[in-house]
Image (cartoon, grey):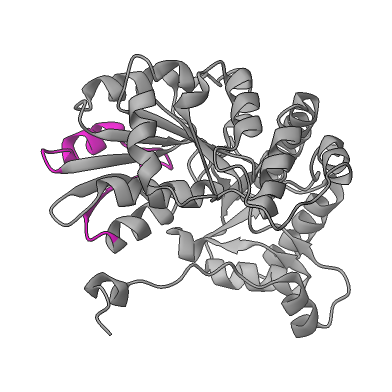
Amino acid sequence: MKWKNQIYNLEAYKPGKSIDEVKKQYQLEQIVKLASNENPYGYSTKVDQALENFKPSFMLYPDGNASNLRNATADLLGVDPGQLIFTNGTDELIQIISRALLEPGKNAVMATPTFTQYKHNAVIEGALVREVDLIEGSHDLKGMLQQIDGNTAIVWICSPNNPTGLYIPEAELVSFLEGVPRDVLVVLDEAYHEYVSKDIVYNSIKFINKFPNLIVMRTFSKIYGLASFRVGYGVSSYDNIQKLEPARPPFNTNVLGQLAASAAIMDQDFVENCYRKNEVEKQKYYIFCQESHLNYYPTQGNFILIDFAHDGDEVSQFLLSKGLIVRSGKSLGFPTGVRITLGLEEQNLQVRNAIKEFLEQK
């Protein structure tokens, strides 16, 4: 078989143990999964209502244009429907962008550590990856600018960054965009945008007209609670979207995903309620970490990365034995860290009590 050479240096994405696997391994009845940054508050009741009223015609293909979802999203964001592309989660959008722009001889600039799929897809396309170390958990935008050259096709920015949760201030982002050549696409991944604190959040989509080389990615998987439906989208200039569309597979968002997302986006009260609860639980973790003398990153997402000064795998395995599935920082570029999704109040208390128990043993 004539596989691409770069395939030999890649590993498939590892989603971690399922709830059923953990139950069997540790003989536990109750499991709390806080490893994938899913919304513990579920999703809008409007989604249930839409699905209940849906009369399936499963023999037919879905709307390849995602028209209803496109119009609802355009209305919410205040953009033209033609400025949107809808995908099977933002994972597919990352793949589409990489497929359309990257090839041997070109390079992609990104932070490290950050969301792993940027690098993964660049490697598959045979492009050179230029990684710039974070500075105290934040993007080194000046350092990233210095890595851009005539062969750079894409710059990836994750804000809030996964796994640190830090958010790029508006002035810093604008200054960076002003310095990027106009023939280099800047991809701003805002999967956790709706969780950013109200006193610092800004609307990055307003920059699309000023910077035609900018595309903003968002998703229905996080605060909207629709991770299993796999619906993400990008917002950019009409010209950029038209260039990306040929790389998008036909009928890539399914009928149920389109229906659920169209209903979810109409319930901004649900989004606001999730935001407020997340803010409350975030502050509790800050206080706990301070009292426990644990370093942490002040997050603008629905997760927190804590430095235990111990092997991250050891900490995550201890929590796993208590029925708590979290993400070791070792695979995320933080060997002594653990990333924990902010769950329900009682779940978070259970995690903190288990962490206390771990620390008392050390």
161 with respect to 356 (left or right): left
Quarter of the image with the N terminus is bottom left
Q: Is residue 130 left or right of residue 110?
A: left
Residue at x 35% of width, y 19% of height: 174
As drawn, 201 above or below 323: above
The residue shown at (44%, 23%) is 169
Q: Which region of the structure is painted magenta?
A: 125-151
Give the camera-side residue of 227 and 72: 72
Residue at x 74%, y 30% (from the top left corner):
271
| Residue 108, image x, y percentages | 25, 47
Foreground of the two, 355 or 48: 48
Using the image, determine if residue 138 lies above or below residue 100: above
Q: Residue at x 75, y 26 (%)?
A: 266
Task: Give residue 224's quadrant in the image.
Answer: top right
Q: Name the foreground residue: 150 vs 110.
A: 150
* Residue 163 visible: no
Q: Nearer the viewer, residue 138 or 85?
A: 85
Quadrant location of the C terminus in the rendered image: bottom right
Relative horizontal placement of residue 115, taking residue 267 as reference (left or right): left
Q: Is residue 132 found inside the magenta-colored segment of the image? A: yes
* Residue 94: image location, x then y, percent: 42, 48
Q: Position of residue 247 (x, y in %)?
A: 37, 48
Is residue 299 found inside the magenta-colored segment of the image?
no
Q: Position of residue 6 (x, y in %)?
A: 26, 70
The part of the image, by quadrant, that contains residue 264 is top right
* 238 sits to left or right of 153: right
